[in-house]
Image (tube, grey):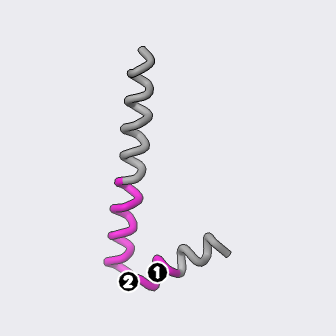
Amino acid sequence: MMTGWRTALLWGAVAVVVAATALSFVLWGLNGPAYLVDLIAAYCL
């Protein structure tokens, strides 16, 4: 039973990383690199 929730947690983490990567590429394509740079700067400052 322990491997069931660990596997689900691993797949959930992989899904979040893939979704974040896909979203970053979509934002890059729509608004160019300046949008992502501004977004990172806003979170860091």
Image vertical order of residue 6 relative to residue 30, above or below: above
| Residue 25, image quadrant | bottom left
Residue 20's label in the rendered image is: none
Does 24 lie within the magenta span?
yes
- Tell me which amino acid carries mark 2: Gly
Q: CA distance from mark 1 to mark 2?
A: 6 Å
Mark 1 Cα shell of 10 Å, populated few (<14), some (14-19), many (≥20): some
Q: How many marks?
A: 2
Image vertical order of residue 39 relative to residue 4, above or below: below
| Percent coordinates x, y for residue 32 in the rendering | 37, 83
Badge 1 marks a residue whose secondary structure is helix
Which residue is label 2 attached to?
32
Does 26 lie within the magenta span?
yes
Toward the right, the furthest residue is 45
Which residue is label 1 attached to?
35
Q: Residue at x 61, y 75 (%)?
A: 42
The reply to whether callout 1 and callout 2 are in contact (CB within 8 Å) is yes
Residue range in magenta is 18-37
| Residue 9, image quadrant | top left
Image vertical order of residue 3 relative to residue 40, above or below: above
Q: Residue at x 36, y 38 (%)?
A: 11
